[in-house]
């Protein structure tokens, strides 16, 4: 494994990744509009991904306009400029900040308000672009794509990060037979049918969507999330300021970094920590979420002194926090496979550390881990199997290095921003061309019947004298 010795950046100094020379347009000039509630300085994963996608699409020659909200999950910023511009990227933000972003009710209200502002933005903005990308952040945002096509003839692509209303059903928030859920599923089908394309980040989510709407099998595509291996690079713990600061250098460290939400399985991890509590192994949890406090309470009740909890980290510190470990964890709760997709996997691959996934037997994570040979997968509830795997890596550093490097190479070959941006760009180009052909066909079909009858040769009336 190649390890870089990188000191902690000085105050006010950001890590700058060398920019590659902007590419010439590869698929032709396209004006793309993106609607998404989350965007940096928010640390929400969907916002971070959209920012990187927009930047790399710009390098492919695509003009990108992003309409987003004000920060709700930023560290030190309660607001951001209403308008920002760089070469191929224009960012517009709504004026109002979000309210109560932590509570479920507040999230729903914020989502509805953002949808309303996005609708007004589309209504007022004359330059809507050639094609619209709508995300499921918030969950009901794709309805605006449907309406934009209905009223403005604007083609749209639907990007599904989390599959709603399935998330609410699997979390037992509401019954699958509820009239609202049935109506929501019906609306989803209309949205997907009218979309130029539907993008999902995993094969299992594709299966879920097709089970609901099999007629879109020719327009649904799997495009994975990604991580930037030039930004996240392997760093030896002894040279990593984050590991030094938090005393992680001399002990085998198991890292869970990201959201500890309702869709993430934490009990298996804590059971493994319980079984390893008397061994020189520590667990570090970085992030927040609905289950974070419950995890802290469970750790305290079990008397686990081998677990530490840290807050979310600033983006420029992510390369250091993700490499301050010897093993990274990814988990999905039972029933959530194909409903949500953990983006934390790709950052862990870039960090060059082995990965342990806690998931169901049919999870796409198992196929990826088996193909890349970067770690192992365990059933939900198999804390004993996870603990045995951790012990094995703790005593076999060479195996851990091999798995970490295999995972990083797998990411560099398949899931870099450049690779994924080209996949998106190709879909946008195809969507624009298909919409243009459809419009042309509709115009031909709309030729008045009188134009056809007037083109016929006139016949002489039998009663008319020559």
Image: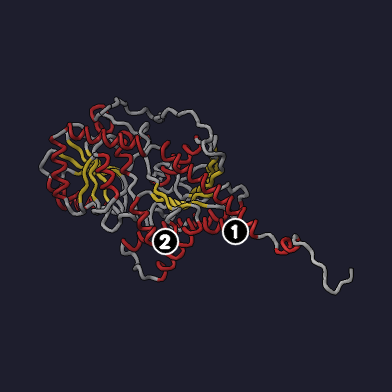
The mark found on residue 213 in the picture is 2
For the question of whether residue 38 can be seen, the reply is yes
In the displayed structure, does residue 249 sit left or right of residue 290? left
Residue 447 horizontal/vertical position (percent): 68, 59
Residue 417 drawn above or below residue 211: above
In the displayed structure, does residue 64 sit left or right of residue 46? right
Of helix, strand and loop, which one carries label 1? Answer: helix
Q: Earlier in the sequence, mark 2 or mark 1?
A: 1
Q: Quadrant of the N terminus?
A: top left
Give the number of callouts.
2
Q: Residue at x 17, y 36 (%)?
A: 252
Mark 2 surroundings: few (<14), some (14-19) or many (≥20) residues within 10 A: some
Residue 371 horizontal/vertical position (percent): 27, 42
Q: Residue at x 57, y 39 (%)?
A: 29
Residue lying furthest left in this view? 278
Q: Quadrant of the C terminus?
A: bottom right
Residue closest to the eye, 84 or 385:
385
For the question of whether residue 86 can be seen, the reply is no
Of helix, strand and loop, which one carries label 2? Answer: loop
**Label 2 – label 1 distance at C-alpha:** 24 Å
The reply to whether the C-beta atoms of the residues labelled 2 and 1 are less than 8 Å apart is no
Residue 385 horizontal/vertical position (percent): 15, 48
Residue 94 drawn above or below residue 325: below
Q: Residue at label 1?
A: 151
Residue 389 horizontal/vertical position (percent): 16, 43
Residue closest to the eye, 256 or 408:
408
In the displayed structure, does residue 390 sit left or right of residue 86? left
């Amino acid at each position: 494994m190649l390890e870089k010795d990188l000191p902690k950046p000085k105050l006010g100094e950001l890590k700058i990744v060398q920019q590659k020379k902007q590419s010439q347009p590869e698929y032709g000039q396209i004006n793309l509009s993106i609607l998404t509630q989350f965007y940096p300085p928010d640390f929400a994963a969907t916002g971070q991904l959209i920012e990187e996608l927009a930047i790399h699409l710009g390098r492919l020659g695509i003009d990108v306009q992003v309409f987003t909200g004000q920060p709700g999950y930023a560290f030190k910023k309660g607001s951001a400029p209403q308008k920002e511009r760089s070469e191929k990227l224009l960012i517009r933000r709504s004026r109002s900040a979000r309210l109560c972003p932590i509570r479920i009710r507040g999230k729903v209200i914020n989502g509805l308000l953002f949808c309303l502002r996005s609708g007004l933005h589309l209504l007022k903005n004359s330059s809507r672009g050639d094609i619209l990308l709508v995300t499921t952040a918030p969950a009901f945002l794709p309805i605006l794509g449907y309406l934009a096509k209905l009223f403005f003839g604007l083609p749209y692509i639907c990007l599904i990060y989390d599959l709603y209303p399935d998330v609410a059903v699997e979390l037992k928030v509401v019954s699958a037979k509820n009239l609202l859920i049935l109506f929501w599923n019906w609306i989803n089908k209309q949205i997907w049918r009218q979309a130029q394309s539907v993008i999902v980040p995993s094969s299992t989510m594709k299966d879920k969507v097709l089970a609901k709407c099999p007629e879109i099998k020719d327009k649904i595509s799997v495009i994975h999330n990604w991580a930037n291996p030039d930004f996240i690079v392997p760093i030896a713990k002894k040279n990593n300021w984050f590991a030094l600061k938090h005393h992680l250098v001399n002990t085998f460290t198991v890292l869970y970094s990201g959201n500890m939400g309702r869709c993430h399985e934490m009990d298996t991890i804590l059971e493994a920590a319980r079984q390893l509590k008397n061994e020189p192994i520590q667990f570090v949890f970085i992030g927040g979420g609905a289950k974070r406090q419950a995890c802290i309470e469970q750790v305290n009740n079990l008397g686990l002194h081998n677990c530490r909890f840290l807050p979310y980290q600033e983006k420029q510190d992510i390369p250091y926090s993700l490499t301050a470990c010897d093993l990274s964890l990814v988990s999905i709760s039972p029933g959530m496979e194909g409903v949500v997709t953990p983006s934390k996997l790709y950052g862990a691959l870039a960090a060059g550390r082995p990965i342990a996934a806690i998931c169901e037997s049919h999870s796409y994570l198992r196929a990826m881990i088996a193909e890349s040979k970067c770690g192992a997968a365990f059933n939900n509830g198999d804390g004993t199997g996870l603990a045995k795997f951790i012990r094995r890596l703790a005593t076999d550093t060479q195996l851990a290095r091999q798995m970490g490097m295999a995972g990083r190479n797998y990411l560099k070959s398949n899931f870099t921003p450049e690779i994924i941006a080209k996949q998106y760009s190709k879909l946008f180009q195809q969507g624009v061309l298909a919409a243009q052909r459809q419009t042309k066909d509709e115009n031909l079909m709309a030729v008045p019947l009188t134009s056809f009858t007037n083109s016929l040769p006139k016949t002489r009336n039998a009663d008319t004298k020559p």
